[in-house]
Amino acid sequence: MNSTVQEEMAAQLKGKDFLALVDYTPEEIEYLIHYAIELKRKQKAREPHAVLAGKTLGMIFEKSSTRTRVSFEVGMYQLGGQALFLSKNDLQLGRGETVWDTAQTLSRYLDGIMIRTYEHRKVIDLARGATVPVINGLTDHAHPCQVMADYQTVLEKKGRLKGIKVAYIGDGNNMVHSLMMGASKLGMDFAVASPEGYESDKEVIRQSKENAAQTGGSLLVTNDPREAIENADIIYTDVWASMGQEAEQKEREIAFKNYQVNEALVKYAKQDYLFMHCLPAHRGEEVSEGVIDGAHSIIFDQAENRLHAQKAIMAATMI
């Protein structure tokens, strides 16, 4: 990407919300991934990159998280700014204040807002009310920050994204929505296998198919794990019951019993496949210990890249 294009992209992203990958062009996604790789290089080389000096990010957590909190907080520090942790008990949102009023007020104090919550509608409403960039740290519908880190990791490990096949085995949840959307924008081949009744959102599937037709990628949606994983470069899974679904644990264990990523299933992937998981993982449930702790696993590389991918998002939008 030449300097002129970089300048145009930087101007384009300044002040932009980061709510879901459907809102971003392939070029913007690629720019952010390469920016993350550059910021990672600078951090490893101990080169100063305090591009957000004097700026503050408010972090609203209605859902707790290890990786999200630490990576955003450390990321802002490394960019020269400061992160402010706000739990649901710290805000008037929990006492009936409207999202609009909260957004308007926080915008007078902060340079950016990250929110990790349940309803995707709340993130959209927060962004509409805010006059500073809003970043989606996770909702029940989408997890775009995780996917930026994931595809950064794939690019680092495989040297390319276009034409790479990602097979996701498990619940058709927020993780799949963002992985599928990102893959379709980047010309990747994406396959997802979920049990009947646990498939991904139909509108996300429709949009992803349209994107793939334009970028040269492909999309396979099936109930057969073996069909999905055939010749995969990347195998991905997530927990069977996400936060807030604990009451469904036993029911889901029955529905997903044939969807464990294990030594028998991965034999259908390419010999040099890589295993990914957004964490936290339940070893022996959605994935066998032999796979997640084996030589093909890159789960901690992708976890590390949450830091660098989110730094790129913050630096690009909050500059």
Image (spheres, rainbow, N blue to C red):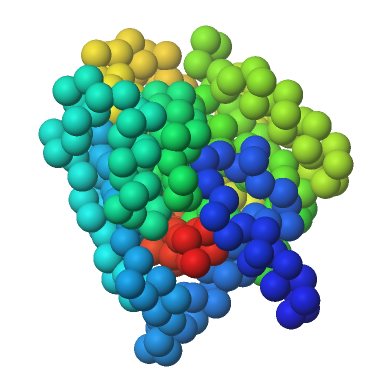
122 left or right, relative to 177: left
Q: Residue at 31% across / 41% down in the picture?
A: 105
* Figure quadrant of the N terminus: bottom right
Q: Residue at 52% across / 58% down in the picture?
A: 317
Figure disc tally: 0
- Please determine whether, in this image, residue 49 is positioned above or below residue 129: below
Residue 80 percent across, percent down from the top left: 34, 75
Residue 36 percent across, percent down from the top left: 53, 68
Q: Nearer the viewer, residue 35 or 92?
A: 92
Q: Nearer the viewer, residue 27 or 84?
A: 84
Whether residue 262 is visible to the viewer of this picture, yes or no, is no
Q: Residue furthest left?
A: 89
Residue 228 percent across, percent down from the top left: 65, 33
29 left or right, relative to 213: left
- Please determine whether, in this image, residue 93 is positioned above or below residue 37: above
Quadrant in which residue 159 is drawn = bottom right
Residue 281 percent across, percent down from the top left: 31, 41
Whether residue 100 is visible to the viewer of this picture, yes or no, is yes
- Please determine whether, in this image, residue 100 is positioned above or below residue 27: above
Quadrant in which residue 9 is drawn = bottom right
283 left or right, relative to 314: left
Q: Nearer the viewer, residue 280 or 22?
A: 22
Q: Residue at 19% across / 26% down in the picture?
A: 94
Quadrant in which residue 95 is drawn = top left
Q: Nearer the viewer, residue 60 or 151?
A: 60
Q: Residue at 39% across / 57% down in the picture?
A: 111
